[in-house]
C-alpha cells in the first residue's frame, strides 16, 4: 500500500508517542468536527437521510464527547502502573508500561459512518499509533468528506483515510498490520480474521446479531416510558440499522395487544403514518439492503403476521416502522439479523421462557430487559451471555465512556470506548528492574542434594 512505509517511518520516529502529539491530534479532531458540522450533517443526510438532531447526537456530539474524555484522561492512561512482585524477588521493582502497537487498520461500517471510524481513531491516537482508516463505500458522501477533509486537520504523515470497497479492503488486508479494528458483519469478520491470521495480527471484531428486548409487566406509567424507549431504540437510531438496535421483542401473551396498541400510537407520534409522510426517521442505505429487508416480509407466514405498517417505497428507500406479531420462528426474519425498521414481537406464556429463547440462539451484542423483578434480572445476568445488558432502557450504553463496548461469541470480541479504546490499541508491557544486590545461589546450578531439599 502506498504510504504504509511512510506511516511506519513516522511511528518509528517516535513522534506519535509523546502526549503532546496525541493531544494535538485529538484537539484537531474536535476542531474538524466543529468547523465541518454543516458538511457532516449534509453528508449524513445524503447517505442515510439522517435528521440533523439524530445525526448530531449519534455522530458529531458523540465523537466530541469521546475526544474530550480522552483529552481529559490521556496522561493518566499513559502513566506506567506499579507491578506487584513476590517477596522472593526482593530487591526489585516492576512497572506496567502501555506502549502503542504500531500502525493499525480501522475498517468501518456505513450506518454511523463518522462515529464508527473516528471513535476507534480516538482510541488509536490516544494510544500513540499511526493509523489507516477505510470507511464504508456504502456511505459515499461521508467517506469522501472524511477523505478530503481529515488530512487538512490531522497529521497526514501519521493518519490516512483510504476510500474504497471490498476490493480495496482486501488489498489492505494483505499487509502486516499491528492491529486490525473491524466494525461490520459476522460474514466479513471471518474474512478479516483469516487474513489477519497470516501475519498473526491481533483483531478486534465489532459485529452484529439479533439484540432482544425482554418486556416484563409494569404499572401504567412505567409501561409508557418503556414503550417510548423501545420505539426510540428500534426506529430512532438509523431506522433500526444499528448493531445495538432492537431486533425482536419478547413479551407475555397477555400483554401483547396492549403493547402493540401502545407502540402504534408512539410510532404515529414520533414518526408519522404511511411511508410517504414519515419524518424523523432514516431511509434504508441502498436498494440492495432495501430489497433484503423487504424480502423478510414476503415470506407467507411473515406477511400474515404484520399487525402495523408494512408499506414501502423503493424510490425513496423508505420502509414504514412495522410490527409483526409471532412470525414463524424458522422464517428468515427470526433467524437473520434484521438491520431495519421491522419489529417482530414473540409472545411467551411465561416471561422466564425468554432465557431459554435467547440461549437457543447466537450470543447477542446486547440484551435489553424492562423489568422491576429482581429474580428475572438475576436470571438474565447469570443465565445468559451477551456483549452487554441494559435494564429498563435501550441504546444508551453506547455513549458511556466508562463502560467497555463490544460483543461476545458471534457478536464479536474485543472492546472499546474511553480507557478501553486506549487499552485496545496498546500493549501493556511489564518491565522488571533488578539490582545486583543479594544473589540467591539456590537458583543456579550445580544442582545438589542440598538444593533438592525443598
Ligand atoms: P460489512 O461487513 O458488509 O462491511 C463492513 C466493512 O467491511 C466495509 O468497510 C466494507 O467495505 C468492508 N468489506 C466488505 N467486504 C469485505 C471483504 N470481502 N474483505 C474485507 N473488507 C470487506 O458490514 P456493513 O453492511 O457495513 O454493516 C452491517 C453489519 O455491521 C451488521 O451486521 C451490524 O450489526 C454490524 N455492525 C456492528 C457494529 C458494532 O459496533 N458492533 C456497529 C455497526 C454495524
Image (cartoon, grey):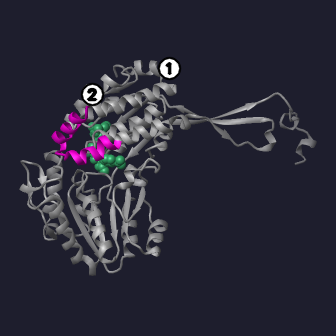
Residue occupied by mark 2: 147
* Mark 2 C-beta closer than 8 Å to ligand 1: no
Q: Residue 183: give x, y in percent of width and height.
A: 34, 43
Q: Is residue 187 magenta?
A: no
Which residue is painted at 46% across and 28% down in the image? Answer: 22
Q: Earlier in the sequence, mark 1 or mark 2?
A: 1
Q: Main secondary structure of the magenta part?
A: helix
Nearest to the observer: residue 349 or residue 177: 349
Q: Quadrant of residue 447?
A: top right
Judge left or right: residue 81 versus residue 149: right
Q: Which of the numbered marks, if any, corresponds to residue 12?
A: 1
* Mark 1 C-beta closer than 8 Å to ligand 1: no
Q: Secondary structure at mark 2?
A: helix
Mark 1 packing: few (<14 Cα in 10 Å), some, or many (20+)?
Answer: some
Q: Residue 259: give x, y in percent of width and height.
A: 24, 73
Which residue is painted at 41% across and 36% down in the image? Answer: 122
Q: Secondary structure at mark 1?
A: helix
Mark 2 packing: few (<14 Cα in 10 Å), some, or many (20+)?
Answer: some
Q: Quadrant of residue 83?
A: top right
Q: Residue furthest right?
A: 450
Which mark's residue is nearer the viewer, 1 or 2?
2
Which residue is painted at 42% across and 57% down in the image? Answer: 388
Nearest to the observer: residue 338 or residue 299: 338
Nearest to the observer: residue 167 or residue 127: 127
Q: Is residue 45 magenta?
A: yes
Residue 158 visible (yes or no):
yes
| Quadrant of the snapshot with the N terminus | top left
Which residues are the magenta region?
Answer: 36-62
Q: Marks 1 and 2, Cα distance to the nearest angstrom? A: 24 Å
Q: Residue 74: give x, y in percent of width and height.
A: 50, 36
Amino acid at each position: 500500500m502506498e504510504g504504509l512505509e511512510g506511516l511506519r517511518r513516522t511511528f518509528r520516529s517516535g513522534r506519535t508517542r509523546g502526549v503532546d502529539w496525541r493531544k494535538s491530534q485529538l484537539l484537531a479532531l474536535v476542531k474538524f468536527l466543529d468547523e465541518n458540522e454543516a458538511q457532516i450533517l449534509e453528508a449524513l443526510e445524503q447517505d442515510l437521510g439522517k435528521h440533523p438532531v439524530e445525526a448530531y447526537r449519534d455522530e458529531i456530539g458523540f465523537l466530541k464527547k469521546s475526544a474530550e474524555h480522552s483529552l481529559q484522561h490521556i496522561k493518566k492512561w499513559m502513566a506506567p502502573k506499579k507491578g506487584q512482585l513476590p517477596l522472593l524477588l526482593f530487591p526489585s521493582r516492576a512497572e506496567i508500561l502501555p506502549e502503542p502497537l504500531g500502525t493499525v487498520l480501522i475498517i468501518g461500517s456505513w450506518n454511523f459512518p463518522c462515529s464508527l471510524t473516528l471513535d476507534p481513531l480516538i482510541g488509536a491516537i490516544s494510544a500513540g499509533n499511526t493509523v489507516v482508516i477505510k470507511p464504508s463505500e456504502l456511505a459515499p458522501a461521508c467517506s469522501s468528506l472524511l477523505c478530503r477533509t481529515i488530512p487538512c486537520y490531522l497529521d497526514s504523515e501519521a493518519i490516512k483515510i483510504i476510500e474504497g470497497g471490498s476490493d480495496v479492503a482486501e488489498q489492505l488486508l494483505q499487509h502486516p498490520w499491528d492491529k486490525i479494528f473491524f466494525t461490520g458483519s459476522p460474514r466479513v469478520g471471518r474474512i478479516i480474521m483469516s487474513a489477519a491470521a497470516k501475519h498473526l495480527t491481533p483483531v478486534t471484531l465489532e459485529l452484529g446479531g439479533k439484540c432482544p428486548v425482554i418486556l416484563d409487566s409494569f404499572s401504567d406509567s412505567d409501561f409508557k416510558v418503556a414503550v417510548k424507549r423501545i420505539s426510540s431504540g428500534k426506529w430512532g437510531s438509523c431506522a433500526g440499522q444499528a448493531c445495538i438496535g432492537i431486533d425482536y421483542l419478547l413479551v407475555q401473551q397477555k400483554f401483547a395487544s396492549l403493547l402493540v396498541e401502545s407502540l402504534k400510537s408512539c410510532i404515529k407520534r414520533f414518526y408519522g403514518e404511511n411511508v410517504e409522510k414519515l419524518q424523523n426517521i432514516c431511509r434504508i442505505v441502498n436498494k440492495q439492503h432495501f430489497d433484503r429487508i423487504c424480502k423478510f416480509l414476503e415470506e407467507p407466514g411473515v406477511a400474515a403476521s404484520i399487525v402495523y405498517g408494512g408499506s414501502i417505497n423503493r424510490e425513496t428507500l423508505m420502509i414504514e416502522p412495522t410490527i409483526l406479531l409471532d412470525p414463524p420462528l424458522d422464517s428468515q426474519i427470526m433467524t437473520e439479523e434484521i438491520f431495519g425498521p421491522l419489529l417482530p414481537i414473540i409472545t411467551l406464556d411465561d416471561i422466564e421462557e425468554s432465557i431459554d429463547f435467547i440461549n437457543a440462539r447466537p450470543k447477542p451484542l446486547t440484551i435489553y430487559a424492562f423489568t422491576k423483578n429482581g429474580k428475572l434480572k438475576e436470571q438474565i445476568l447469570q443465565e445468559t451471555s451477551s456483549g452487554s445488558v441494559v435494564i429498563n432502557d435501550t441504546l444508551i450504553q453506547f455513549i458511556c465512556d466508562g463502560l467497555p463496548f463490544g460483543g461476545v461469541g458471534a457478536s464479536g470480541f474485543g472492546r472499546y470506548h474511553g480507557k478501553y479504546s486506549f487499552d485496545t490499541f496498546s500493549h501493556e508491557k511489564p518491565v522488571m528492574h533488578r539490582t545486583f544486590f543479594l544473589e540467591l545461589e539456590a537458583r543456579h546450578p550445580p544442582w545438589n542434594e542440598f538444593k533438592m531439599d525443598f
